Image (spheres, helix red, strand yellow):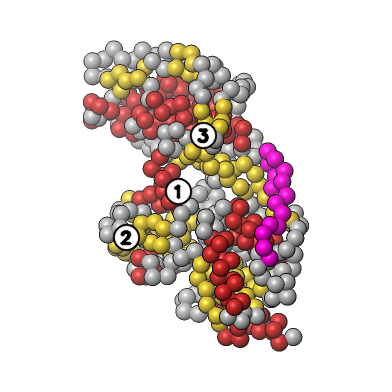
Amino acid sequence: MTPSTSNTNKYLLITLIALLSLLIVSSGCFASGFVVGNNIASKKKAARPISPNDTTSDDHIKSIPQPDDFDTFWKTMQLVQDNYDGDVPQGRIITFAAIEGLLTNIESCNTNADASPDKIIQITGIKTPDDAPDNFDFFWRTANQLYRDCPNAMPEPDELVYQAANGVIKRLGDRFTLLLDPKVADDFRIDMESSLEGIGAVVQPTDMDKGTGVKIVNPFENSPAAKAGLKEGDEILAVDGTDVTKMTIDEAVHLIRGPAGSQVSLTIKRDAQEPFDVTITRAKVEIPVIESKMLDNNIFYVKLNEFSAPSADKLEAALKQGQKEGAKAIIFDLRGNPGGRLDKAIRIASMFIKDGVIVKETGKRNISHMAEGELVVPADTPVAVLVNGGSASSSEIVAGALQDYGRAILIGEQTFGKGSVQTLFDLPDGSMLRVTSAHWFTPKERGINGQGLQPDMIVSSSVDGKEDLQLDAAVQYLQKQLNK
C-alpha cells in the first residue's frame, strides 16, 4: 500500500493504533536469560530468525539488515525487569508498547513520494532472542510498514532502538526511568562532573508529571546565563527556534549545551511578560560546587550546588575552614541543588549527624544507610538549612535527616519531592539506562516522593530577586539561638 492522501495516512495510523488496542490481550512471561555484569549488560542470547512481511518487491525500496545496536533493546528490557522498583511490562505487552514508541513522534504521515530514496527502506534478516515475546515479529512488520508509508516521520534505523525501548519504559509511568541515546548519555555523564560547556544554569522540567519542558532553577554566579540576565523561574520555550516545551529535559539540555564560544538563542517566558529572545555565548563553566563566606556575628554561610564526586571533600574543607575562622553557627544552603550521588549525600549528612540512620532505601533490596565518617560540625553548633522547590533528591536526603534528628531547622519553601533512587547502566553502544531501582524514606520513615519536605519556617523568595528573604530569616533565627 502506498498512501496518496492525508486521509489515507490518517487511516494507516488509526489502523495501527486500533491493532494495539485489540491485540494487547495476552501477557506471556518474558523469561530471564540475559546477563548483567560490571554495570554493562552483556552476553547475547541465542537468536531465532523471523520473517517480516515481504514488502521489498518495489525497486525504489532499499533493503537493509537489522541495525547492529538493536541488541540494546533486549539488554534494556532485562535490566528494567531485574532492577526496576515496581511492576514492569511482560510478554506481548512489550511488543505493543515498543510499537507505541515508534508512533510517539509521528504527528503526520507524508507520502513517500516526497521522501529521499534513502529513507524508503525495509529491514530484513531479523533475529530475535528465544525469550522474546512470541509476537515480536509484529513490531518489525509495523516498523517496515511505517518506513514504507511514512518514511519522513521515522527515525534513522540505528535510532529505532531508543524509541522502541522508551515506548516500553513509558508504560512504567516513571519519568525518571529512561534509556538515553549515546549523545544525551554523554551530556548526562558531563553533568556528573564539575565542569561543562554551556550556559551555566541548573534546570528542571516545567511539567513535572511528564518530565518535559525547561525551567531555570539556579543560574550560576558569573555564568553566561547570569550575565545574560536569566533568572530563577524563567521558562525556556525554544532553543534556536526549536520548540522544547514538549521535549524531555535531557533532549532539551542537549540542544542548549554546546562548544565554548558558540552562541545559542533562547526564547524565554518570564511571569506574565511577553516571550522574548536572549542570545547567549556559551563558555566553559566550572560549576562552583561550594560557595562560602563568613557573615556578621560569626555565622558561616555555605552553599552546595550539587552532589558530585568532589562535593563531600570540598564541603568538609569549607566547614573546617569556617570553624578556624570562628564560626559559631552555620547556614547550609541547598536551594536549587538538584541532587546527585547518594554516597555523597550520606557522607555529607554524617558531617552533622554522628550516629544513626541517614536514609532508608526500599526496593529490590531493603537497606538502612548509616552515618559514616568524621563528625565535622559539633553537636552544639546551631544549623539552619535553606531549601526550595529546586532542592531535590540527595538534597532532600540530607535535609530530611537533619530535620528528623532535630539537628537543623529547615527554612524556605517546600522541596521538590524526588524520593527515588536511580541506578545507571552503561550499555555497549554508548547509551545509558537510568532506572528507578529503589525509593527512599527519612530516618523517621517519612516518604518524600511526590510531596517533598515541608520547612519548619516557610519563607517565600522575593519576587524581584533583589533581597534574599530566606537568608535573612536564617540569620535572624541563628542570632536568636546564639543569644540564648
**Relative vertical location of residue 193 with respect to residue 233 in this rendering, above or below:** above
Q: Which residues are magenta?
A: 361-375
Residue in the image at 69% along x and 76% along y? 382
Residue 163 showing in the rendered view: no
Cα–Cα span, label 3 and label 2: 33 Å
Which secondary structure lies at badge 3? Answer: strand
As drawn, the label of residue 282 is: 2
Decide whether residue 366 is among the magenta residues.
yes
Say what secondary structure mark 1 lies in. Answer: helix
Q: Position of residue 316 (x, y in %)?
A: 59, 66
Read off the residue under disc 3. 40
Q: Are marks 2 and 1 in contact (CB under 8 Å)?
A: no
Image quarter in which the C terminus is found? bottom right
Q: Residue 188: which disc?
A: 1
Measured Cα–Cα span from mark 3 to mark 1: 17 Å
Residue visible at 55% across and 54% down in the picture: 340
Element at label 2: loop
Query: Disc 2 to disc 1, how far (Cα)?
Result: 18 Å
Among numbered discs 3 and 2, the one appearing first in the sequence: 3
Between discs 3 and 1, the one toward the N terminus: 3
The amino acid type of the residue labelled 3 equals Ile
At x 32%, y 60%, the residue is 282
- Count of marks, rendered view: 3
Residue at horizontal 65 percent and vertical 38 percent from the top? 86
Quadrant of the image occupied by residue 422? top right
Examine the rendering and report whether any part of residue 126 can be seen: yes
Q: Which quadrant, please, contains the N terminus? A: top left
> Which mark lies nearer to you, 3 or 1?
3
Disc 3 to disc 1: CB gap under 8 Å: no
Instruction: Say whether residue 113 is magenta.
Output: no
Q: Residues within 10 Å of mark 3 (few under 14, many from 20)?
A: some
